[in-house]
Image (cartoon, rainbow, N blue to C red):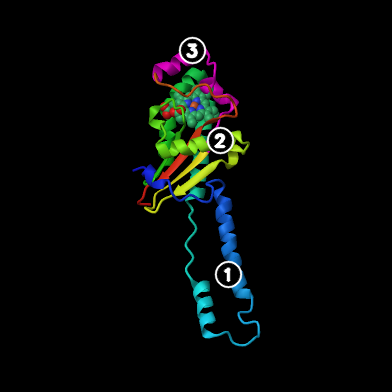
Amino acid sequence: MPASPDSLAPRNFGTGRMWSDALGRRHTGAVFLLLALCTSPVNATGAEPDAATSASVAAMTSAPTAPADTRPSQGSELSAQLGKQLKQTLQSAMADGGPVAAIDVCQLQAPAIAATIATPGIHVGRTALRVRNSNNAPDPAQIKILQDFERRLSAGESAETIEQFDSADDGSARYMKAIVTQPLCTTCHGTELPPEIAAAITQRYPNDAAVGFAPGSLRGAFVVEWSSSQ
Ligand code: HEC
């Protein structure tokens, strides 16, 4: 079952941008604190520290540290895996049978590839503000993130770093990573599609809204969602 989207809105790491830095800083901060506690003399006079201080130091140094959440990096890996497999499939289909044949491959293979990458409790897919396949339509929380990604991309941020991880108290979480339009994509998602491609797309997707994208613009995002049982 996909993660419940509405439960994911609250806790994101810092600005939601560059969670790895946010985590890294928090981690570094914690290590620094522990180092400071371990290396600096507890009592500057050299006398035995009093019992209360020893107890609190012991408590702090032996306190169990929460294990780092590995889902942001897992999300990043799964997204990269999906992106790589889709692009390879697309490129070989285009080379083998041309763009019209590649449309069929996209239609059949895109959901199938995503399904092979997903595991129980982890949903992997793609979404966008304007979709071709309505199964990929974003939920309200995803719409907000996609709008934020567009803003960040137009503010000059590198597509590589445009990602966001949100986790909720119920254990569910969501990772999203921007997908930017490349020149190759405009054959089927651009402003002026060759007529035979436009016809083939309209035939298969009568409600297609995934056209009009210029290279460099936000095409959509990879989405990895963990259900609350994970
Ligand atoms: C040969 C035509 C073709 C090309 C080229 C192509 N796509 Fe698509 N794209 C499709 C089709 C068909 C779908 C719908 C797939 C489905 O039914 O799940 C789609 C769906 C998508 C989606 C999912 C959201 C939606 O609109 O349903 C994204 C994101 C996407 N494409 C990105 C890209 C990117 C990025 C590139 C360039 C690397 C690209 N596409 C190149 C045909 C194409």
Residues at discs 1 and 3 in contact (Cβ within 8 Å): no
Q: Which residues are magenta?
A: 178-205
Q: Position of residue 186 (x, y in %)?
A: 55, 22
Q: Residue furthest right?
A: 45
Dot 2: few (<14), some (14–19), or many (≥20) neighbours within 10 Å? few
Residue 90 visible in the snapshot: no
The residue at the point 60 percent across, 79 percent down is 42
Say which amino acid is labelled 1. Answer: Leu
Dot 3: few (<14), some (14–19), or many (≥20) neighbours within 10 Å? few
Count of labels in the image: 3
What residue would you read off at disc 2?
A: 151
Q: Secondary structure at mark 1?
A: helix
CA–CA distance in space, label 1 to label 3? 65 Å
Residue 175 colored in magenta in the image: no
Say which amino acid is labelled 3. Answer: Glu
Residues at discs 2 and 3 in contact (Cβ within 8 Å): no
Q: Secondary structure at mark 3?
A: helix
Say which amino acid is labelled 2. Answer: Arg
Residue 34: mark: 1
What residue would you read off at disc 3?
A: 196
